[in-house]
Amino acid sequence: MPDPAAVAYLSGNQALVGPHARSDQPVARDPAGRPMLALRTINHGESLAIPSSSDEGEFSAIDLDRAARLLRAAGGEEHPVDPRVLGLVYRIQTHFRVPEIRVVSGYRVPKPASRSNHGRGRAVDLIVPGIVDEDVAAFVRELGFVGVGIYPSSQFVHVDVRPRSYFWVDFSRPHARNREHAILGDLAMKSDAAALDGGKLPIEPFGIVNDVEGALRTYGVPPGSPVANDDEEEDR
């Protein structure tokens, strides 16, 4: 059973203290006045602010390399970061008008047979200062082609980019096996459909293929069917 703190968390009574505490720092802006993507890693204690060339979050190759360095694994291993996941994080930051995003985890060296998006440079575990995690998750769930997981025991939000949206709650504690429960499957399909109607292209599966449906079939997923989570991994 979930502990009392996790129950309070899911009820919208999350305490905004520690890494969740609100920041009074001003939002960093580029010379044109657009907010910059500002990241601070909780574990490494490092920070980075990079300019975006659009309101959707688009970054230069040099800045993508700088972000990959910031989001490196605990052992120092680096991996290219998918620009679309940085765009997603940028949209979170600008939507909530916060001066920074606090990163719990970026790249993690994948274990054998792991399907984690962290090992593909497509996922970030994060905290938005001054904002309860459920509000962050609710915003991202509407965007389409995303994975969104909330972790009541550890208290952070996992976000990633993927071919079809999938949402979950996981009550596992740090460095423990996942205890994931899928949620809001209908919303996941509706969000993807709305994204398509708005002209957003699906995220291709991780692999070299020519079409999305063909790629999904290679994973044994019939076209049009809901998908399971492709971020299964221990030791979050």
Image: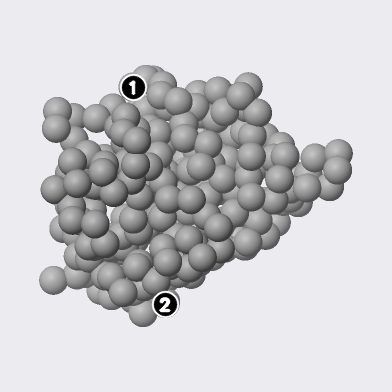
Name the residue carrying label 1. Answer: 75
Query: In the rendered image, which quarter is residue 5 located in?
Result: bottom left
Query: Is residue 110 in sight in this rendering?
Result: yes
As drawn, is 156 to the left or to the right of 102? left
Q: Quadrant of the N terminus?
A: bottom left
Residue 16 on image: x %, y %: 50, 65
Question: For numbered disc 1, what is the local secondary structure?
Answer: loop
- Viewer-proximal residue, 29 or 17? 29
Identity, as a three-letter code, of the amino acid under mark 1: Gly
Q: Residue at x 49, y 62 (%)?
A: 195
The correct choice, above or below, for 197 with respect to 65 in the image is below
The correct choice, above or below, for 3 with respect to 89 in the image is below
As drawn, is 126 to the left or to the right of 168? right
- Viewer-proximal residue, 202 or 98? 202
Q: Colour mode? A: one colour
Identity, as a three-letter code, of the amino acid under mark 2: Gly
Residue 46 on image: x %, y %: 55, 31
Q: Quadrant of the C terminus?
A: top left
Give the distance between the C-alpha atoms of the residues marked 2 and 1, in whole angstroms: 35 Å
Query: Is residue 16 in sight in this rendering?
Result: no
Q: Residue at x 19, y 65 (%)?
A: 181
Name the residue carrying label 2. Answer: 12
Going from N to C along the chain, the mark reached first, 2 or 1, is 2
As drawn, is 227 to the left or to the right of 48? left
